[in-house]
Amino acid sequence: MFKWFLHFFSTATLVVSQICFFKILPFLKYFDFILFFIIYLSVKKRKTAIPAAIIGGYLLDIYSSYPFGLHIFALATAAFAADYIYFNILTGRRFFPIITLFMFETILYHGALLFAISGLAFLKLSPKIKVISGDTLKNMGLELIYTAVIGSLIYLIYFFINKKMSSRLLIRRYGP
Amino acid sequence: MKLIFRGKTIALTTAVFVLLVFLHSIKILDAPEKFFIDAVAPIQKKLYNAGRTAGLFIQNIFSEKNANEADLLRAEVRSLTLQNAQLKLLTEENNLLKKELGFSRQYNYELIAARVIGYDSLENSDLLIMRIENKKYKNSDIAVDMPIVAADGVLIGKIAEIKEGEFFMRPVTSPQNAVAATVLNKNYTLGVIEGEFNFGIKMTMIPQSEKLKQGDLVTSSGLEPKMPKGLLIGAISKIENDPQNPFNIAHITPFYDAKNLSDVLIIKNY
């Protein structure tokens, strides 16, 4: 129960931080922390992954100028895809496949958003806008690069801390 | 390895998604959403200010001094000094005319204080999320396309969308924004300015016969509804003059970057 609350609270905190803090900073604005967290929950087999994706998407939709539902759709799609790819396609669970997964998920997330926006414009439920432009593609490229770099750093830090904590736990339980 | 998300989960997620969209469309979720927005707003203000400070600090580390920028600034100062002198003369003449006609009218804007609290969560969107600071006013008192100015009256954007508890500003530098403008040159050239992707503004379709120069000031022309005349926008930084083309393009540097502002004003009535 506590883990559920912790994951939902973390999702809400990341949403608020993303739109008010990270989006203003020159480098971190190209890294999607919420997507990264949802993918992390999915690959760690946490049952909170989909509920967290729905809550994160819901909060992002509250702070979005576009029709409601886009981010819920995109984040839930990314969570399902991450689970399927990690457990069915990736043969290795090491550094490079994980980073490739994150980069692919970023493209999938943006693709789902663009698909939803285009669909709503086609159904005349939202104004028609130019969804793909030079700037959009440039930003996507930058986001992929920063996802690879920052994702790698986070993965390495997490791996290092996990290793240290595991060895200390073993020492405490079974002695030196 | 088994999938943790099976068909049942997908069906349940789809059902929850459809239910949320339906409840949102019939406005049942408006009250809890507004409660959340109001509860989180103070934290957002602090986070946004911290982000602005950090962003400016990082920008200052990486920006380089440009000699051309200094030249532009000198040209602007010269132009502004000249403008100031001319305006003073005009003001004197105007006061005299008013006195003679027995006519006095003051332009008072009804202003609503607002604050920027974040960025639109949609990727590649340049809209800013804002909240009304003045408790006397609510979101029902504002309307789309109302101009938003900085404290000194410089136009920085327009209201693009209004939601429960918040609204969105589209900066003048947004490619989807267009403002009817006047260049304060000899002919008071009229045109429409649009944002550019590099956070600049451009005025297109300027006939070759119109004489513009670097440093000329650009203001709103007042030819569109809800937009008063005379709101400063920026100064001309570059003119693209192609003899093969019947029209010129003027690139304008805005006086303010909306990303660096926190407290702004909405012009409700003028």
Image (tube, rainbow, N blue to C red):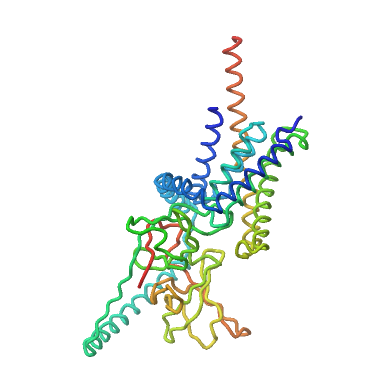
* x and y, in percent, of residue A112 in the image: 67, 51
Answer above or below: position of A43 versus B34: above
* x and y, in percent, of residue A142 in the image: 62, 52
Nearest the camera: A94 or B43? Answer: B43
Going by the image, does B179 lie left or right of A97?
left
- Residue lying furthest bottom: B100
Q: Which quadrant would residue B95 be assigned to in this image?
A: bottom left
Answer above or below: position of A165 versus A29: above
Going by the image, does B40 lie left or right of B199?
left
* x and y, in percent, of residue B182 in the image: 44, 79
Q: Which quadrant would residue B75 be assigned to in this image?
A: bottom left
Residue in view at x 59 percent, y 36 percent = A154
Q: Quadrant of the N terminus of chain A?
A: top right
* x and y, in percent, of residue B85 in the image: 30, 80
Nearest the camera: B247 or A11? Answer: A11
Answer above or below: position of A157 versus A31: above
Residue in view at x 46 percent, y 66 percent = B69
How many labels, in total? Answer: 0
Q: Which quadrant would residue B184 be assigned to in this image?
A: bottom left
Q: Quadrant of the C terminus of chain A?
A: top right
